[in-house]
Image (cartoon, helix red, strand yellow):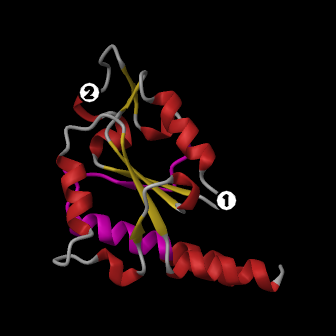
Amino acid sequence: MGVVTKAVNWARIKSPWILHFNTGACNACDIEIIATLTPRYDLERFGVQLKGTPRHADVLVCSGPVTRQIKDRLVRIYEQMPEPKFVVAVGTCACSGGVFQDCYNVMSGINAVIPVSLFIPGCPASPKAIIDGVVKLLQSLEESEAKK
């Protein structure tokens, strides 16, 4: 592994940039995700920054079940992200479809369409659970990097 690759991986672990995408949620999880970025919970202390484009994001944070209408958009956003990329499913709906499971237009959770790195259950998932999940994801990335 080259020096440049190690530097890029270190930067991604120490300062992950996230993209928040709502796939059809009721907005309860969206409010909690945004709350984690406010000064009260301050997810930015871990170097996390919210970005507006998938081309700059390392982590895709999804809330809501995957509907047939949003499936192609979700895949396109995932494909636009640079490697290595990670997906976090926030809330019961994103994890399994939740209360919308078996509805005519709902496919299931996020993992029915794209690979998910981390599931954070809850209806809605609390900011503390979201922070805990992000910290665990960063720790697992750091451990995998140390093994190389």
Q: In this view, does 1 lie to the left or right of 25?
A: right
The x, y position of residue 110, in whole percent, is: 44, 39
Do residues under tags 1 and 2 come within 8 Å of each other at their CB atoms? Answer: no
Q: Give the range drawn in magenta.
A: 114-138
> Could you say which disc has been placed on residue 100 in the image?
2
Q: Which picture quadrant has residue 6? A: bottom right
Quadrant where the C terminus lies?
bottom right
Q: Which picture quadrant has residue 47? A: bottom left
Is residue 101 or residue 25 the one in the foreground?
25
Reply above or below: 133 against 99.
below
Quadrant where the N terminus lies?
bottom right
Q: Residue at image x 43%, y 56%?
A: 52
Of tags 1 and 2, the one toward the viewer is 1
Q: Residue at image x 19%, y 38%?
A: 26
| Circle 1: residue type | Glu
Q: In this view, does 40 lie to the left or right of 9?
A: left
Name the residue carrying label 1.
83
The verdict on residue 17 being magenta is: no
Q: Is residue 125 left or right of residue 45?
A: left
